[in-house]
Amino acid sequence: MSRSPRPRRLAVRLTALSATALLLASCASGTGSSSSGGGKTVYMLLPDTTTVRFTTQDGPDFQAAMQKDMPGVKVVIQNAEDDPQKQVQQVETAIAGGASAIVLVAADPYIAGGALQQASAAKVPVLLYDHDARGGNAAAQVVFDSLSVGQNQGKDAAAQLSAGTTAKPKIIARIYGNQGDYGTTQYKKGQDQYLQPLIAAGKVKVACETYTPNWDPAKAQTEMEQCLTKTGNHLDGVVVMNDGTAGGVIAALNAQGLAGKVPVVGGQDANLQAVQYILLGYQYDTVYKPFKLQAAKAADLTVQLLKTGKINSSDVDGYVDNGFMKPGVPAAFLPVQNLHADTVGTLVKDGVWTWKQICTGPTAATATCKKESP
């Protein structure tokens, strides 16, 4: 894969999600009869409900951005609910229903390839959103800089594992995301830049490592339970790849009285539960990816496809290899930011969460919430 030296820094003003927007995201909608989007229908197909951000943020944010950029366009948002075959059927239904464009968050990168080929044959442009899809044509992809995500995670993990002095290697578990995903591959590559030198030097030993089908937190919990059994509950750290799998890991650790004692590093998505876990000391970090930024960029590129059938070359930062297109799918890479306990306030400032939402239950008793919560 080729990429530009660094993604362009884009700025958007983030605002809080409303319950109304979330409800709108679950159905088709459009406003106005004489606006520029009249007669156009865009399908946004989400992969699952286990990755909370897609239903609570990306869907509503894309809906709102499309109405801003092309008033009157009809947006239909559907969720495959962890079933890649169901998503393929949704693509087929969208094509049969006269879709003008499809924004696809692939449930499975390989199974989605057939759907890409069907859309191409029907001359329906597909914009890949976040997840990659292999084996077919796509007009473009909007994704946060996945390698940078992994580098942030690996840097934090290395710092945690290098703290203190011991003659014995630190024992860790590595819980990856869905095997074969472009993101999973890039996150691991970025993490390895910092972890492999420690492993090669004998300072870190990986006791368990496994991929998590569909990023399912429940499966991550089972994977962690199996690792704890294997190691006799002796772990010096767990390196994960997103907040959902981190939550599954923390559930397994908590059952053994180890939550907060074994560092869990490598979150991403800034889920509400993850932010609370960070303040409680159960999770060390989360990589913040401003979803309104991604949704706005996706809407911009979708409108370009609807109006001209192509995207501007100035919007291409690099390419994502999908095993089909050469040199790959044209991609817009978006910047990320790593957050810790002392910087989660960024999410409140950007309107992702409020202190009232964050500071509930046990989190309300943390020093941060006592200081910030109204």
Image (cartoon, rainbow, N blue to C red):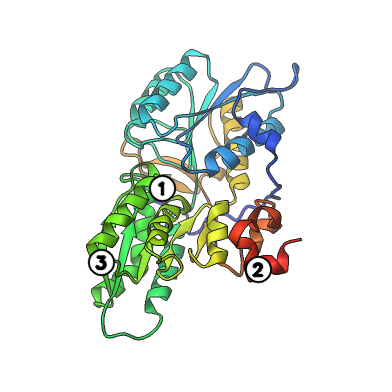
Q: Is residue 270 visible?
A: no
Closer mark to the observer between disc 3 and disc 2: 3
Q: Residue at x 54, y 53 (%)?
A: 273
Q: How many C-alpha atoms fall within 10 Å of the one at disc 2: few (<14), some, or many (≥20)?
A: some
Secondary element under disc 3, as helix, strand or loop, is loop
Mark 3: amino acid: Gly
Q: Residue at x 24, y 73 (%)?
A: 200
**The image quarter in which residue 275 lies:** bottom right
Residue 258, horizontal then vertical, whole percent: 40, 66
Q: Mark 3 and mark 1: span between their CA atoms?
A: 22 Å
Using the image, determine if residue 168 lies above or below residue 87: below
The residue beneath circle 2 is 368
Q: Mark 3 and mark 2: span between their CA atoms?
A: 34 Å
Using the image, determine if residue 359 lies above or below residue 142: below
Mark 2: amino acid: Thr
The residue beneath circle 1 is 217
Mark 1: amino acid: Pro
Horizontally, is 60 left or right of 145 in the view? right
The residue beneath circle 3 is 232
Q: Mark 2 and mark 1: span between their CA atoms?
A: 27 Å
**The image quarter in which residue 87 lies:** top left
Q: Is residue 55 visible?
A: yes
**The image quarter in which residue 224 lies:** bottom left
